[in-house]
């Protein structure tokens, strides 16, 4: 299930791509974390402590921070994933998702 980062896409395609990825896992949305960043590697693997070889993560590249915020809000408000809406730098145009575990930050607990 590890697919990593994909090329740039419009926000609707990004929503559909991440939603399909989350649904494919058959794990409740509340166990997933969605956020935005300007550096997916740093944010996911270093700051959120997601293991490099972990299969359940994906990042998509959208045209603007406004699009990234819209995608993030869709998942947090409508799909009910975990996430820290409103974060990210002014150049944060990546949206990422990962399935929380006991060792990620935030964790599954």
Image (cartoon, rainbow, N blue to C red):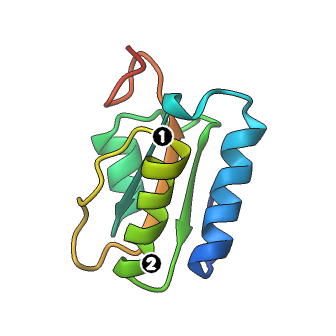
From the image, tell me which residue sits under label 1.
Answer: 81
Which class describes the residues within 10 Å of circle 1: few (<14), some (14-19), or many (20+)?
many
* Secondary element at image label 1: loop
State which quarter of the image contains the N terminus. top right
Say whether disc 1 or disc 2 marks the residue closer to the N-terminus: 2
- On the image, the x and y values in percent for residue 28 come to 61, 28
Figure disc tally: 2
Which residue corresponds to the image point at 51% horizontal and 41% vertical from the top-left? 98
Q: Nearer the viewer, residue 79 or 57?
A: 79
Q: In this picture, is 109 found above or below 88?
A: above
Taking 30 as reference, is 89 left or right? Answer: left
Taking 37 as reference, is 63 left or right? Answer: right
Q: Which quarter of the figure has residue 4?
A: bottom right
* Secondary element at image label 2: helix
Taking 4 as reference, is 63 left or right? Answer: left
Which residue corresponds to the image point at 66% horizontal and 52% vertical from the top-left? 19
From the image, tell me which residue sits under label 2.
Answer: 67
Taking 65 as reference, is 4 left or right? Answer: right
- On the image, the x and y values in percent for residue 37 come to 34, 63
**Residue at the extreme bottom:** 63
Which residue corresponds to the image point at 49% horizontal and 65% vertical from the top-left? 71
- On the image, the x and y values in percent for residue 11 come to 57, 76
**Residue at the extreme front:** 78
Report how far apart the C-alphas of labels 1 and 2 lie in the structure. 18 Å
Residue 31 in view: yes
Which residue corresponds to the image point at 43% horizontal and 59% vertical from the top-left? 72
Which class describes the residues within 10 Å of circle 2: few (<14), some (14-19), or many (20+)?
many
State which quarter of the image contains the C terminus. top left
């Amino acid at each position: 299930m590890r697919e990593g980062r994909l090329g740039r896409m419009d926000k609707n395609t990004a929503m559909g791509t991440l939603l399909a990825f989350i649904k494919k896992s058959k794990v409740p949305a509340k166990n997933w974390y969605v956020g935005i960043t300007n550096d997916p590697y740093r944010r996911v693997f270093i700051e959120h402590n997601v293991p490099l070889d972990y299969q359940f993560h994906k990042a998509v590249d959208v045209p603007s921070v406004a699009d990234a915020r819209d995608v993030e809000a869709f998942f947090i408000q409508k799909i009910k994933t975990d996430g820290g809406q409103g974060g990210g730098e002014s150049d944060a145009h990546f949206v990422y998702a990962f399935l929380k575990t006991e060792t990620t930050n935030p964790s599954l607990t």
